[in-house]
Image (cartoon, helix red, strand yellow):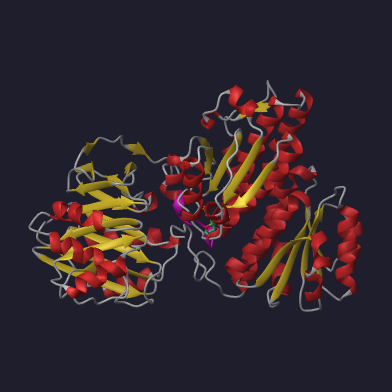
Amino acid sequence: MCGIIGYTGPRKAAPILIEGLKRLEYRGYDSAGIGVGCDGALTICKKVGKIKDLREAVPDDLDGCYGIGHTRWATHGGVTDVNAHPHTDTTGNLAIAHNGIIENYLILKARLEAEGITFRTETDSEVIAHLIAQHYEGDLEAAVRKALPLLKGTYGIVCLHKGNPQLIIGARSGSPLVVGVGEDEMFLASDVTAVLAHTKQVVYLEDGEVVVLTEKDFHITDLNERKISKTIDEISWELEEIEKGDFKHYMVKEIYEQPEAIERACRGRLDPTQATARLGGLNLSPAQLLDVERIRIIAAGTSYYAGLVGSYLIEQLARIPCQAELASEVRYRNPIVERNTLHFAVSQSGETADTLYAMRELQRKGSCVLGICNVVGSTIARESNGGVYIHSGPEIAVASTKAFSSQVTAFYLFCLLMARKRHMSYETGEWFLQELTVIPEAVKAVLKTEPVIKKLAKKYAGYKDFLFLGRGINYPVALEGALKLKEIAYIHAEGYSAAEIKHGPIALINEETPSMFLVPDDRLREKVISNMKEVKARRGKLIAVVGEGDDEIREIADDVIEVPRVHTLFSPFVMVVPLQLFAYHCAVLLGRDVDQPRNLAKSVTVE
Ligand code: G6P
């Protein structure tokens, strides 16, 4: 969602801020703006649309070596130039940019209006500018400190004042901020991608912390002005990883990175001598792992579907009751926390508000919550009681692809570890490792079917409704396939268990509603074939994803996509890729904005 960038140093701020905002585009936004201070003046430029529209609106000769920038994803107030950030106080001396939601803004606004302040925007964020200005007596840091306790809700704030040259102040409560420590220059951003082109040295802010940046230095304190010393972390991502390279879109680049992503998630974690997996970050002793009686996985979006795959696998192989649930639902239903239940919070970004708040609620109730995250230093990664980094590398496209495969891999490793601690034999453990090790090659082989999938996309992109159907461990994959088509092609699609179609969705079937069936060679195959025939009898078009050389299905389906034959329990890895590519090519053919689909955000930091 919204992105923040701040800069102070010897260089011209405007191009650095705009480049930083460009890097934050992937988070999803509808307008953007910058505020730059120079020689006692403050210039604000803001624009609805893309960063290129903002770039055109910024004068080439805009000087000034300190400034702030923001990409806005509208929550309070329409998508207009005026509502875009930064927001200023009535004098125009001070500017702020804000991520998050100020829940008590209506009360604050009424009070400020009663005091004679005229509001110019419909946003909740504008109150912050006025509150800081009210407390400003020449010292911006002091003014911010006085304003912060008045705010209820979530915020990542960055601000500057024309009376305090080269000074940038940031504060965080529930919305991430990271300091980029450069050579004689400092950055502040909502995530590391915005600063990676300039520095790899970063310091993550915690909730309740205030940071003051000057050109050469920074210091962090808590709300009571106690100094906090922090370690500087080194970002492991490379700049090339956040660039498209030769690919047309980030999404297809990331689809192609999946074999490597699966390998990275496994690296250093396979233990062939014991036929098990090693996951040091879990922070649980062997005895604690043995005590686990139940597992609950919480997540949102694609991460939830990865968790569902994990739940099928864990129940089947580790024989531990395991449930995956939507984090947003868990949080508000007063979840029951039982002894010896292990929780996983799964999140690529590690910042999804629904997942984070549900995790906190479970922790408040005394449970141990492990994180499965991609972004190192993200809030869920830091606040969880341990976990597994999936090491996918940066995922920039809004629609998640490689993170799904890596999250699923993390569950496979965890499942092996738990199963081997219980009843799984050494030989079965060896078999499991063997199956897992061939997956990257199998996924590479699926990628080679892209021309076939592209052709199918041409044939089917014009349809308005789709069904995605799978069973068992591929039921979540069907859900993920439908989500991908909705997200980036804007085609209405429903994911169902193939068995369920007779309980409702079959009413939708006619020649206008194609169905994509996932048909691995497993014990449910005959039943799925019957479901396919039911669809065919009603003139529904059939596309099937099948194992190589499956002539029986070729006879029934209108079109087939063949994937390498792997054991059914490992089939989600190969089944999901054609669905990602199908959605991608439909979206391209329909002229969609593949990497930044309308209305969506990569990291959803509000509920
Ligand atoms: C948003 C994104 C999805 C993502 C979901 C969960 O909705 O658009 O692609 O799956 O959030 O994100 P997370 O970072 O928690 O995995």
Q: Which of 563 and 309 is in front in this view?
A: 309
Residue drawn at x 58%, y 67% as measured from the top left: 488
Q: Can residue 544 be seen in this view?
A: no
Report which quarter residue 15 is drawn in: bottom left
Residue 245 among those drawn in magenta = yes
Where is residue 463? Give x, y as percent.
Answer: 71, 77
**Residue found at the very far top of the displayed protein:** 273
Q: Please, is residue 397 above or below residue 292 in the view?
A: below
Residue 115 among those drawn in magenta = no
Residue range in magenta is: 241-250
Q: Which of 501 and 218 is in front in this view?
A: 501
Q: Nearer the viewer, residue 113 or 200?
A: 113
Residue drawn at x 25%, y 58% as measured from the top left: 150
Q: Please, is residue 591 above or below residue 480 in the view?
A: below
Does 312 sit left or right of 324 as displayed? right
Where is residue 515? Give x, y as percent.
Answer: 78, 68
Q: Please, is residue 175 above or below residue 46 in the view?
A: above
Q: Nearer the viewer, residue 343 or 550?
A: 343
Where is residue 570? Give x, y as percent.
Answer: 74, 43
Q: Can residue 575 be seen in this view?
A: yes
Where is residue 187? Give x, y as percent.
Answer: 27, 50
**Which is the main secondary structure of the residues drawn in magenta?**
loop
Q: Please, is residue 382 above or below residue 86 in the view?
A: above
Quadrant showing the N terminus: bottom left
Does 349 sit left or right of 333 as displayed? left
Report which quarter residue 75 is drawn in: bottom left
